[in-house]
Image (cartoon, helix red, strand yellow):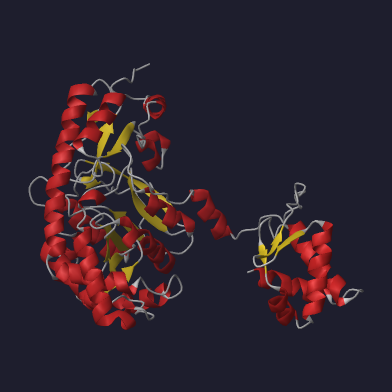
Amino acid sequence: MTRQILIPLFQQAKNTAGTRREQVCSSLRNAIHSGALPIGQRLPSSRVLAADLNISRVTVESAYSQLEAEGYLQRKVGVGTYVSIQIIKPPKTPRPSRLLQLSQRGNQIVQTGGCQDPLQPQAFAAGSPELRAFPLKLWKQITNQQLRIRGEQLLRYGDPQGYRPLREAIAGYLGQTRGVNCDAQQVIILTSSQQALQLIATLLLDHGDDVWMEEPGYVGARNAFISIGANLIPVSVDQDGLQPNNTLPAPRLIYVTPGHHYPTGVALSLERRLMLLETARKNHAWIIEDDYDSEFHYTGQPMPALQGVDNHGSVLYVGTFSKTLFPSLRLAYLVVPPTLVNAFTTARTLYDGHSNQLMQAVTAEFIQQGHFAAHIRYMRQLYHSRRDWLLTQIEQHLKHVATPQAASGGLQLTVWLPTGQESALTRQAQQLGVITPPLSRQYQTTAAQRDGWLLGFSALTPGEISLAVERLSRIKLP
């Protein structure tokens, strides 16, 4: 590293007046004054530096001796030559920066605020799986197996559509568990469901197109559509899900979470599903079915995917492994109608090319060997018990503040708060060391807002849930 610093400096110094010794001295002084060579940094031997700079060793020795006399260097026989002085640099005067000039779309993206996920599980940050229960030893074994069998192949560039065995495994799994009608050719492996939403928005929407959004609804989807200049149409949600009416403009795209509405948890009724499919058919519109946590359904049988009853190729189905396996896996999937496969695969090459080959292979094997289904069964039981424990704790300690929304599954629980109290109660919770994500952020329109929290429980043990609720029980209504 030291040699990489000194060689360019010496090349610059060669254009100045003075002997070679003076040029070496100047190069070293500049490196020390700039901070590139800090105190204690060992320098190359005179022989090595002379060879690097293509000058005589006598010249380097002379320069080292001069700088030692000046106090810049310290030389020890048999040990080496070291920087012996630390230069305190004056604070930099800020240079006038160039005016930030983003594109119109760039400004729209920045103004959304982006999408931030919690880095650590904490009560009650929403959406994190319980990683302490993940079969890490088994995952390591499969990883080592895949490296041993096809290591070199998995280190290469991958198919932008995704690793074929994983696409086959996903198609089989979705057909069996969610009633999705697809084959491996319709499956595209992506990095995240957010990437899927951004790809859909980019390829299927133009500036000003009308998009029906659930109200309240998922902020990540809203941001994806806003970022490309779409016109969002909030559509209210009741106990049967999205509630369209005749006053709404014809949509270009409809975004729904029909299996488990985000954030209230209600399921879209069969009548509404058929209504949306007919709306899409009549208007040549697309439907995004975000099936973000359908695996974790606790009461009765979940309704099959909307995609499975689509006879006109209108539905794009989005799923992810971030909640079912672990977030840093960075694998999600998008099922598209056959006519869209080539366009989405091509566009994907402009984003990040392909997902991690090794992780795709390990995930495919994890599914094919039956471990994924077993893991889901176990986690479903675990999360179910934690959801019920949270409900019990709220009933015992928090019913003066929070009213839970009935829901059949999920990794978080919606609770309603007294009207007009969300901000004040959230501040009190924060002071007590508890995160209570407010529901108001999920609404587009102020008039439709209801006060509430979205409490994530899946990554918390019963003891952690009890402690957090006990803290919240100290909250006082104004």
Task: Write down the quadrant of residue 239 in the picture.
Answer: top left
In the image shown, does 130 or 60 lie closer to the viewer?
60
Identity of the residue drawn at 77% across and 79% down? 57
The answer to whether residue 283 is above or below residue 459 is below
Quadrant including the C terminus: top left
The reply to whether residue 182 is visible in this rendering is no
Task: Give the image quarter of residue 43.
Answer: bottom right
Residue sitting farthest toward the front = 77
At 19% from the left and 49% from the top, the residue drawn is 268
Number of numbered markers: 0
- Residue 301, given in percent of the width and then of the height, sits at 8, 51
Identify which residue is drawn at 37% across, 59% down.
194
Q: Residue drawn at (35%, 53%), measured in percent from left and top?
A: 212
Instruction: Say whether residue 112 is left or right of residue 86.
Output: left
Front residue (pair 89, 333)? 89
Q: Position of residue 433 (x, y in %)?
A: 38, 30
Q: Nearer the viewer, residue 285 or 88?
A: 88
Q: Is residue 269 visible?
A: yes
Q: Quadrant of the N terminus?
A: bottom right
Could you say which quadrant of the image residue 353 lies in?
Answer: bottom left
Q: Nearer the viewer, residue 111 or 377?
A: 377
